[in-house]
Amino acid sequence: MKKTVLLVLAVVLLLSLTAVSQAQESPVITVYKDKTTKIIMAVQYTEYKDNSGDVQLIIAHDDDRDLYFDGVRAGDSFTYSINVEETDKYELRISFGWLDSTGKYTIVVDGEEVGILENTIASTGWRNWTNSDPISIELTKGEHTLTIVNGTPGPNLKYVLLTPEGKEVGDLGTSVHLYDGSASGTPWNLKDNNLSSIAIQFNATSFIKSLKLSAPNWMATPDIDYELEFKLYKWNGSFAKTVSGTSVASRVFEKYPDNTWLYMPVNVEAGEYVLVVTNNGTPNSGFYIKNKAHESQRVYFDGVVKENMAAELIIGYASTPETDYGPLSEDTPENPETGDSVAVYLLVVVATFGLAFLKKRQDA
């Protein structure tokens, strides 16, 4: 009997730890079966290697503060985790800024070369984003790794576009600003203001592809550790109950460029959400807050609503959203925390104490 109980507790503990591990995995990029999939190269990569095999980031931002890979060298490679909805042939294009028109890019799927994209289209400027010639590749349904190897030194690279063969490149989604751009703004440094977190509650009326916040680093030097962590939660009746649950998407941004837009791919349905931003104890970390409220969002400092404020938040939609966002949910009376993370924690605690108790009984 004791052996059976010990086995059950051990299994519970193992499943609990597995659940925690799986909850921290980064989501893969969905390759749609009926429309163009846009991969943000400097944001959604799972691995970047320079031509010597060392991991080095060369990320800049353009005039719109959007991130891209700057001055890519021959031999640099970029790997992405993708989940293909349907087996089909897809046209792959790369969105680049470059005056040369002789770019070559080797396309690798699951470690095997599937072709070389030979581009003959010239961009009109280093940051005038232009789509390359296409290359047709076959992708089977399911998860794969997609690697792009640059064959010519010099280009600035921004997007990878995957379009089912026979369809036009289009419907790359719509970006919606959930703040008043004419209002004055303030860069809020979390550590300097003794804040553990700044959170934004908002309504989304279409499928969300990404969230974007404008972030400074106060001209931080390379020797300073600074970062921001985004965690997105589905609204669950109250702020406290919502953030005690399991996040549906997360991303850590380390040593991002000053005054840039930080992207987090999410791939979630329409609904009401809370985005929690923390600095993980580092200085020179924060983001811009407008000094004017916006009807489509609510700002929290350490869980407390701040009136007359709105974050510089942009939602990337998969399609054109509705215009009527509706009112944000108000907090409801608190209930005991029952989020998935809490449940996992309790299972771990119970299993640990149970194992210790039974071991003590056996030793007696």
Image: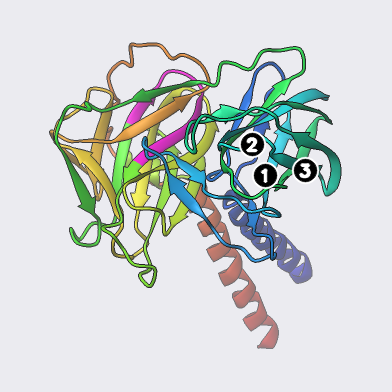
* Numbered disc in front, either 2 or 1: 1
- Decide which of 200, 340 is in the foreground and name it: 200
Give how far apart the Cα atoms at labels 3 and 2 are: 20 Å
For residue 82, which quarter of the picture? top right
Question: Badge 2: few (under 14), some or many (20 or more) residues near its Cα, within 10 Å?
Answer: many
- Inspect this view and state whether residue 34 appears: yes
> Which residue shows up at 40% across the image and 32% down it?
273
Residue linked to disc 2:
29
Q: Quadrant of the N terminus?
A: bottom right
- Decide which of 249, 317 is in the foreground and name it: 317
Q: Earlier in the sequence, mark 3 or mark 2?
A: 2
In the rendering, at what x and y percent does residue 97 appear? 54, 36
Q: Give the extent of the magenta segment.
A: 202-213
Q: Is residue 288 left or right of residue 44?
A: left
Q: Is residue 287 above or below residue 132?
A: below
Q: Is residue 209 magenta?
A: yes
- Inspect this view and state whether residue 241 appears: no
Give how far apart the Cα atoms at labels 3 and 1 are: 14 Å
Residue linked to disc 1:
80
Q: Is residue 172 magenta?
A: no
Question: Badge 1: few (under 14), some or many (20 or more) residues near its Cα, within 10 Å?
Answer: some
**Label 1 SS:** strand
> Which residue shows up at 52% across the image and 36% down it?
266
Residue 106 - label: 3
